[in-house]
Image (cartoon, rainbow, N blue to C red):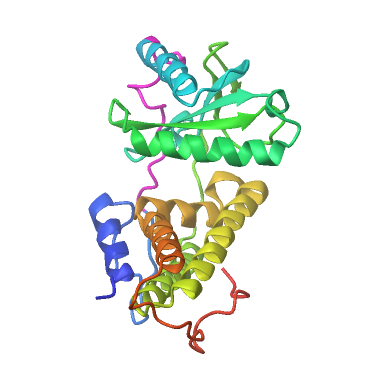
């Protein structure tokens, strides 16, 4: 049975009280959606940060130990340039969903001259490590990432754990957000995710995997473009966050992996490849 993603999205909005809820997927709803809260606080997360906006010493101690164990587990012997905290947990727009995003900054060229290859290998190791562990610090999950020292990282708050200071100090800005464009992008992307699931359920595994891969790239590029142009409150970044918090991106990734496994397998019941139905986007669909 096909999952009703629009229903799940509405339930998510109601549960988290992000907005004064109205049926945003009902085209007959005459009233505009009014935003009552966007989880912008006048302080940083008090369990993570001290009143003078420094990292909680107990949190710092834990994070340094976690990074040490991470580097040992992935068997990586390289000089660490810095260890930074970034993402919404390092800004006034933190929520109870915010991860503690810890970036281990290294010089990838210390490992090999083929930087792209090193990135791919480290990405797989960090993904495996994050999937294996579920470390919670004051109800926020710790996520570890590897970052090249020359990599451009767009963020409104970056804190150096090693030097115990802000590299980019967050500022308190009350956003002016229009829900309409966000709703439009979210609805369209949810429909595309549903299409991936339909293809998978129809056993069109090649098409499901290809469509999922293209959709993942488009969502990633959408968010990057929004951050570069208009920052964390851009329509594109907010649509991405809603999809992530509603677990739609997890669903897309699951079908991406499952379709690959089915596509690569063989059995007596393996079906012949069929053409993509005419109503499936051709890859040039707009977000």
Find the magenta span and give its range.
36-57
Query: Does 222 appear above or below 31?
Result: above
Which secondary structure is most common in the magenta stretch?
A: loop
Closest to the observer, 120 or 282 = 120
The residue located at (49%, 65%) in the rendering is 212
The residue located at (46%, 16%) in the rendering is 68
Q: Which residue occupies the extreme bottom position in the image?
A: 278
Query: Does 164 appear above or below 3?
Result: above
Q: Quadrant of residue 40?
A: top left
Closest to the observer, 129 or 17 = 129
Closest to the observer, 204 or 143 = 204
x, y percentage for residue 164?
53, 12
Closest to the observer, 215 or 260 = 260
x, y percentage for residue 35?
38, 55
Question: Is residue 266 in the magenta section?
Answer: no
Query: Does 125 appear above or below 57?
Result: below
Dividing the image into 4 quarters, which one contains the N terminus?
bottom left
x, y percentage for residue 19?
33, 55
Q: Does residue 262 appear anywhere in the picture? A: yes
| Left or right: residue 78 compared with residue 179 | right
């Amino acid at each position: 049975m096909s999952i009703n993603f629009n229903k799940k999205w509405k339930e998510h909005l109601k549960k988290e009280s992000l907005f004064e809820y109205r049926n945003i997927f009902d085209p007959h709803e005459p009233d505009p959606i009014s935003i009552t809260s966007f989880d912008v606080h006048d302080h940083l997360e008090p369990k993570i940060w001290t009143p003078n906006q420094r990292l909680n010493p107990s949190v710092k101690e834990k994070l340094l130990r976690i990074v040490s164990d991470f580097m040992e587990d992935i068997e990586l012997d390289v000089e660490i340039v810095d260890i930074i905290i970034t993402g919404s947990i390092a800004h006034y727009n933190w929520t109870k969903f915010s991860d503690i995003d810890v970036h281990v900054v290294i010089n990838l060229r210390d490992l090999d001259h083929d930087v792209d290859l090193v990135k791919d290998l480290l990405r797989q190791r960090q993904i495996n490590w994050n999937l294996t562990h579920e470390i919670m610090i004051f109800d926020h999950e710790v996520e570890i990432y590897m970052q090249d020292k020359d990599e451009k990282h767009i963020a409104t708050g970056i804190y150096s754990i090693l030097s115990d200071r802000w590299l980019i100090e967050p500022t308190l800005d009350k956003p002016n957000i229009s829900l309409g464009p966000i709703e439009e992008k979210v609805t369209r992307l949810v429909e595309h995710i549903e299409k991936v699931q339909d293809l998978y359920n129809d056993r069109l595994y090649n098409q499901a995997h290809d469509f999922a891969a293209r959709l993942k790239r488009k969502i990633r590029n959408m968010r990057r473009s929004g951050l570069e142009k208009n920052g964390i409150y851009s329509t594109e970044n907010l649509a991405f966050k809603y999809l992530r918090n509603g677990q739609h991106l997890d669903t897309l990734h699951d079908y991406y992996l499952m379709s690959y496994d089915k596509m690569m397998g063989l059995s007596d019941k393996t079906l012949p490849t069929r053409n993509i139905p005419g109503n499936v986007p051709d890859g040039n669909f707009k977000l």
